[in-house]
Image (cartoon, coloured by chain):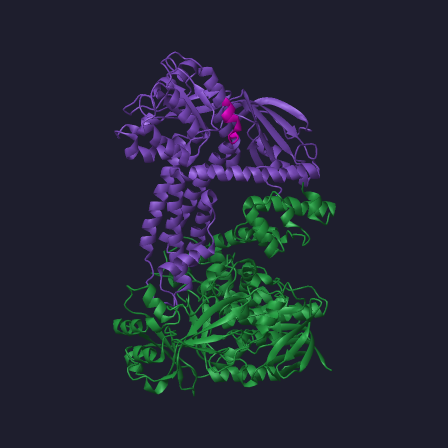
Amino acid sequence: MDNSDIIIAPISATQGGSVNLIRLSGNGVIELVNDFFSREIISSEGGRFYYGQLNKKNETIDDVIVYVFRTPHSYTGEDVIEISCHGNFFITEEIISLFLDRGCRLAEPGEFSKRAFLNSKIDLIQAEAVADIIASRSRRAVKNSLKQLHGSLSVKINELKKELINLASLVELEIDFSEEDIEIIPYDKIVLQLQKVLDEVEKLIDSYESSKSVSDLVQVLLLGKPNVGKSSIMNTFINRERVIVSSTPGTTRDHIHEDIIIDDTFVRLIDSAGIRDKAESIEKEGVSRAKGLVGESDLVLFIFDGSRPLDEEDITIINLVKNFNPDLITVVNKTDIKLHKETISRIQDYFPDTPMVKISATRKTNIDILKKEIARKINTLSDQHTNIVTNIRHYNLLKKAREQTEHALKSTKAKTGPEFLSIDFRSLIDTLGAFTGAVTTDEILNNIFSKFCIGK
Amino acid sequence: MKKYDVLVIGGGHAGIEAASIAARMGMSTALISLDREKIGLMSCNPAIGGLAKGQLVREVDALGGLMGRIIDDSGIHFKMLNTSKGPAVQSPRAQADRPYYARVAQSYLSGRKNLELIEGRVNDIVVSSGRVEGVVLSCGTRIFSRAVILTAGTFLNGIIHVGLNQLAAGRAGDLPAKGLSETLSALGFRTGRLKTGTPPRIHRDFIDYSAMEEQKPDEIPKPFSFSTDKIDRRQISCFISYTNERTHDILRQGFDASPMFTGRIKGVGPRYCPSIEDKIDRFADKNRHQLFLEPEGYHNREVYVNGFSTSLPAEIQEKAIRTVRGLEKCKIVRLGYAVEYDFFPPDQLKATLETKPVTNLYFAGQINGTSGYEEAAAQGLMAGINAALKLAGREPFVLKRSQAYIGVLIDDLINKIHEEPYRMFTSRAEFRLLLRQDNADLRLMDEARSLGTVDEKAYEKMTCRREQIEKLKKDVLGRKVSMEEFNRLYNGVSTPVKQNHTVEKLLKRPEVSLKELLSLIKTETYMDSAILDVEFGVKYAGYLERQAALMEKFLKTEALIIPPELEYEKIGALSAEAREKLSVLKPRSLGQASRISGVTPSDISVLMIYIDKFKKTGVSRGTALTK
């Protein structure tokens, strides 16, 4: 809303390239970056670039080129800094986090352009395009958030939100309905519940910190019944590509997922076999977990054994896939053995508009074609930096939630009045609401009316 | 033929304020009611104020309304609620001498310059090319006016239910206002249907008060009005009793003949004010419900059984109520009933309460889907003020959510879809800490002064208070308190200090009060209300700063006015739901738009672009902006 605060976002198109570009725009941005840059840029007249090091507490994050633009000669018309850093996800993220911690705000989709319009840097037609972009991005964001809705994060966040709506209801009850014949919750119970909330928030922060790259990659799921060749396809990819993150140990299988680069994009290959280490067949508990994986994946490679007729297990998975309607490529493996014609036509009947690639994993036939098809699909997927932003945003929200929960705990322990606790709870609810949707006063009142007998 | 400036239809709590303030602002005004003896009648419980509602009354008073003065003159049991909590959530409430309250209201009105009282039934509203011109009474008389304020309460197509018996009525004993609803529908207004209920009234001489809990009034009653110095009327008690399992069993026997459970009542009732049958049905595990017995006056024999609202058949009401401790021998004087009535969904109103379809026609009170005397009074006042301002060619008077509960009330009304009668709660006010009942004068009297509605004596008192507050902040908070004196005064209450500290620092301790600290340092004397204000500001500075920051953000978006010509249907970048709702509700500002359910942050971003474009280019139509 505020047109003068400093906003930041990566502006280079994809991950995995050799260079990433980050833009910051707003009042005081040159002074801000100057604090972390090895060279003095405050006296820069603008329209210049500087090579140097970006430092965080005497530790160099990266060698970068800093571009200085002074108002009005910049894209947004404001003072702008663009930082060109090495094309590594972690570096990009660290730089953005550095400035977020110093009071910058992540740019909303289209926000640089919006400012450009407001400062008369772009014209009406361009501004319309921005409005459309905002709308289309938000639709994509909805798609993204739907995807995450199946994931454990949203489940957790919603549980926490519910807990907090209950707490907020209890303090509102004490204020607005103190004349009713209703039992008031003792504060030590509130403390217990807040402690639980704090534990959960901390767990989420830990999980982000220990595996923060996970959801920033394009996730490609290898799906199919046992023995269709998932592991050999996985190995084929790994043999040909550099392994970036070591595989996760400690399960009965060696590889559950591997991170590779396809077409300049980070891709995480996930072997759905890994989800079956306890279940005998996919129809059992494996199904629900497979559902989760399909829901969270960006792309599914549905693998069939082309040398055999489709069986019940194939059909179960087909139905599951059809239910979710993910981005999909069907892969027919084992072309080195004689292909079963009916199998191929039946797959095409089930998925008429889906690309099909026939390969032999053992002989490495047509693997390039499969890679190309994956790359083509990836390019049509939601663009990368929406994902990054989403995740840095989540992390920051969680940190904010932690701070707010701690404050609420402190206030509760100090026996602060309900009208003040209410402010603590509501700001916490607002923070969590930024993940999965805002909560209004009406929802809190509804909760009160459904649980308590109000009204003399 | 005489032409009035303002005609007010209805003599309830909205009508009284509307007529009084319009006349006070110099408009020639007439109030038309069915029966002038019934002006100011309290048709539900005999109490004014209560949580959040008390704040509304104080605000109405600060702005020059009558409700606070009337209750101060007629109250028989004053009580400040939530005194165990901070000043921000305390609210005054008072029981009224019911018949006397109405008489006081009538005497205020008959003494008002520029105001005439007319008895009659309004059958029709005259509208010509979209502008109101007056009304037609049932006797055929036409009365002309430049503005009309409709405050018809529950009288529009009112139906009263007692058991399976129905009766067309406005409230018990009064005829309904028929015809008006149809007239307004023909003018393009949408109507909805709501329901509310009342409990039976019982005869006080057959109540055994000794078997009940007594609730005493405050020892020193605090007045509602900033113009009242002191209340010295005799104060009497209320009493509390409870229903029991036997009561519930009997009530259940009547469920077959309940107009609610049998589906006869179509209107939606308020969840915060359920009938007793609803309570035992929905909360079956609760084995008792509290009843609050409110006396209706010194001489009035009727007692109001708050908590026993019901529309069950007469014999069930009688049998059930006699199972309550202390009411074994009671006699019902008037039966409980439910009333269904038409209302006009208030999204058809502007923030001034003028209707969108008809110029110079205003709606206030229960016909807007609210419940409560206080909510009605607040709307009546605002409609009256705005009608008068408009006729005088002056700028409208709209209160923001950050200024007053009245602002929250009207903003909620016009921006939300309402499914039950709307009642004020403090939780609805996001700036609750700032909107205290005790600072309504500081918040609103400057406004009232420029409107010309302020009570000069009260205004003087307020400015004096304001000066003292400033002085306390400037001269006293920074002064040091002697360590020895502090430790002596707070011996055993507060941890001893080891050096002299400032007043401000010591005040941060919950157990320390400003008044006590002032006794330790030499200062002039300050009024309690100033001391309270400063103490609150210091003790809760952190929270207040958070509210202030929130308010600043809020005001920024409020200040972004959406050009009324903006054609939402043509902005393809908005979500379909936002397009639809914005087209219907036509919000005035971006802030208002952001509070409409279904309008997302990205819709707001899109709107911002279009608003700025309007400003820059002066393009008056949305078409030029879209593909």
Q: Is residue A446 magenta?
A: no
Q: Please state the horizontal and vertical placement of residue B417, each as a whole percent of the image.
A: 52, 59
From what the image shows, is residue A75 above or below residue B137?
A: above
Q: Can you say which quadrant of the picture contains the C terminus of chain B? A: top right
Residue A41, visible in the rendered structure: yes
From what the image shows, is residue A207 above or below residue B457?
A: above
Q: Is residue A103 left or right of residue A148?
A: right
Instruction: Give the quadrant of residue B161.
Output: bottom left
Q: Please state the horizontal and vertical placement of residue B66, each as a whole percent of the image.
A: 57, 76
Q: Is residue B99 left or right of residue A21?
A: left
Marker count (numbered): 0
Q: Report the residue at 49% width, 65% height from top.
A: B422
Q: Please state the horizontal and vertical placement of residue B427, each as a whole percent of the image.
A: 46, 59
Residue A105, visible in the rendered structure: no
The one nearer the camera, B490 or A397, is A397
Q: Can you say which quadrant of the picture contains the N terminus of chain B? A: bottom right
Q: Report the residue at 33% width, 36% height from top.
A: A288
Instruction: Give the quadrant of residue B7.
Output: bottom right
Q: Report the residue at 38% width, 59% height from top.
A: A450
Q: Please state the horizontal and vertical placement of residue A80, each as a whole percent of the image.
A: 63, 32
From what the image shows, is residue B513 above or below residue B611?
A: below
Chain shaded purple: A
From what the image shows, is residue A297 above or below residue B151?
A: above
Q: Magenta residues: mostly which secondary structure?
A: helix
Which residue sits furthest top?
A363
Say which colour chain B has: green
Q: Is residue A377 magenta?
A: yes
Magenta-highlighted residues: A375-384
